[in-house]
């Protein structure tokens, strides 16, 4: 059973590491486009039935962008990203497939959600899009067994066990039950692995940029000078 395909974009954060800003972090311009638009475009590339943008009412620029993009706006004051994603799941069927990612990130390829969706439709409960990002600071990295299966999630490690991190996901809604029991998405993914839930990592590319810090935002024009499509 395929279920509906719904994209959930958590955009309710305060961007404390980047303040002061002239706009919401998700609307910062990278290569002439709001950074959130890159994630929206990747979700649209797999023909989502609905896009849901979770944000706070006072983030009026995000609300305006969501409405212009034809997305459903979901208001709330989540305390962390897991609560934000969970708000976006409201009313969905357990068999529906949800796509999520981070609207302050840019990555390739444009159709990167397609193999993730295919894996879930073929029977996996969760498929994570993996990116090779050596030296990326402040991200969660992965460890693998000899067969290439994910064995561990490491939250912002000082010495990553590999160069691979995850930055996009497709999952059955039922696989996200209990998401708000922990603070970070990787902690929930780690709990799924420990319980034997069918989770797979799919290597997508070595092109990933997180603009969540001043350092990475400063680097953005040099490493992402123009859209690649």
Image (tube, rainbow, N blue to C red):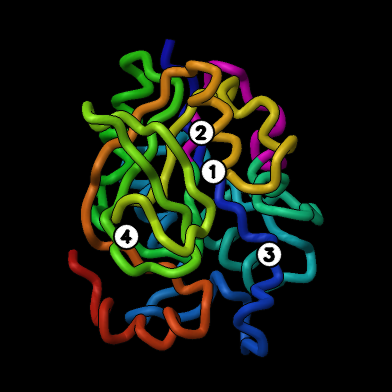
Measuring from the top left, give residue 114's x and y in whole percent: 28, 36
Q: Main secondary structure of the magenta part?
A: loop
Q: Is residue 119 above or below residue 63?
A: above
Label 4 SS? strand
Give the residue at mark 3: 13
Marks 3 and 2 close (CB-CB < 8 Å): no
Give the residue at mark 1: 186
Picture disc at residue 54: none
**Residue at x-position 61% and y-position 19%:** 93
**Residue at x-position 60% and y-position 29%:** 176
Measuring from the top left, give residue 168's x and y in whole percent: 41, 46
> Mark 4, mark 1: which one is toward the viewer?
1
Does the stretch in magenta take in 93? yes
User: Mark 1 or 2 closer to N-term?
Assistant: 2
Measuring from the top left, give residue 159's x and y in whole percent: 41, 61
Picture disc at residue 98: 2
Picture disc at residue 107: 4
Give, as a single range, the part of the protein colored magenta: 86-99
**Residue at x-position 51% and y-position 84%:** 214
């Amino acid at each position: 059973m395929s279920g509906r395909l719904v994209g959930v974009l958590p955009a309710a954060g305060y961007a404390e590491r980047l303040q002061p800003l002239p706009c919401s972090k998700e609307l910062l311009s990278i290569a002439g486009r709001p950074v959130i638009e890159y994630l929206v475009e990747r979700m649209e590339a797999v023909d989502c039935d609905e896009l849901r943008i979770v944000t706070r009412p006072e983030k009026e620029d995000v609300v305006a962008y969501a409405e212009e993009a034809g997305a459903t706006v979901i208001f709330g004051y989540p305390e962390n990203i897991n609560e934000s994603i969970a708000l976006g799941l409201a009313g969905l069927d357990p068999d529906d497939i949800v796509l999520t990612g981070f609207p302050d990130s840019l990555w390739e390829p444009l159709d990167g959600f397609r193999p993730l969706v295919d894996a879930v439709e073929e029977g996996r409960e969760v498929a994570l899009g993996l990116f090779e990002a050596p030296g990326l600071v402040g991200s969660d990295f992965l460890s693998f067994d000899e067969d290439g299966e994910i064995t561990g999630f490491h939250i912002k490690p000082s010495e990553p066990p590999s160069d691979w991190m995850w930055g996009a996901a497709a999952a059955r809604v039922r696989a996200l039950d209990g998401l708000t029991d922990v603070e970070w998405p990787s902690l929930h993914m780690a709990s799924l692995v420990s319980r034997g839930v069918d989770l797979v990592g799919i290597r997508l590319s070595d092109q990933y940029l997180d603009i969540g810090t001043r350092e990475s935002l400063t680097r953005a024009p040099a490493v992402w000078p123009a859209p690649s499509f």
